[in-house]
Amino acid sequence: MVYGVPQEQDWNALADDAFRAHLRDYFEAHFPRELRFAPNRLHWPLLRPWYRHMAEKGWIAPAWPREFGGMGLSQAKLLIFLEEQERCGVVRYQDHGVLMIGPLLMRYGTPEQQRRWLPPILACEHIWCQGYSEPGAGSDLA
C-alpha cells in the first residue's frame, strides 16, 4: 500500500545548503505572516489550512519513511527542516499523531492498523492527543 503523497525527489540526495535554501524559500513564501512567532499555542482552526497544505505537499511527516508516506529525511536533514521552520516562525500543531502514534503503528501495528490509521494522520484528518491519569488524584480513568 502506498501512503501519503509521493515525494517529488529524494531530499537526502540534496546538499544540505541546497535543501536549507529550498525550505527557507518555501516557508518564507507560503507560511502565513500573521501566524509567525505566535506567543501562545494556536488553536487548530487557525492552523488547519497551513497543515492541510503541508499534508497535500507530503511534508506533514518529514521523519517518517517514504514507504509510509513521509519525506524519509535523514536525521541531519530533519534537523535542517526543523531549524528552518523555527527560523520562519512556523508554529506546531497537535502533532501527536505524527510524532507518537504514527511511529508506534509503523513499528508495532498490523498492516490493517497501518492502513486504517496512517492515511488520516498524514492527511490531517485525525488529530490525536495524549492524556495522563494520576491514580488517586481524581483523574484516574480506571
Image (cartoon, helix red, strand yellow):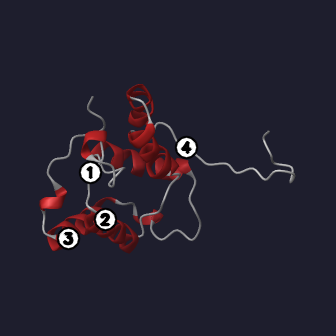
For label 2, the crowd category at 10 Å Cα-Cα, with few meaning under 14, some 14 to 19 and many 20 or more, is many
Q: Amino acid at mark 3?
A: Ala
Q: Position of residue 141 (x, y in %)?
A: 78, 41
Disc 3 versus disc 2: distance between alpha carbons?
A: 10 Å
3 vs 4, front mark:
4
Dot placed on the residue nearer the N-terminal end, 2 or 4: 2
Pick the quarter of the image with the C terminus.
top right
Q: Which residue is mark 4?
A: 128
Residue at coordinates 26% horizontally, 51% vertically from top-left? 71
Disc 3 versus disc 1: distance between alpha carbons?
A: 17 Å
Q: Amino acid at mark 1?
A: Met
Disc 4 versus disc 1: distance between alpha carbons?
A: 20 Å
Disc 3 versus disc 4: distance between alpha carbons?
A: 32 Å
Secondary structure of the residue carrying tag 1 is loop
Residue at coordinates 42% horizontally, 64% vertically from top-left? 90
Residue 21, labelled with which disc? 3
The reply to whether residue 112 is in sight is yes
3 vs 1, front mark:
1
Q: Position of residue 83 (x, y in %)?
A: 35, 72
Residue 81, labelled with which disc? 2
For label 1, the crowd category at 10 Å Cα-Cα, with few meaning under 14, some 14 to 19 and many 20 or more, is many
Dot placed on the residue nearer the N-terminal end, 3 or 1: 3
Residue 71, labelled with which disc? 1
| Residues at marks 4 and 1 touching, judged by CB atoms closer than 8 Å | no
Q: Position of residue 120 (x, y in %)?
A: 43, 35
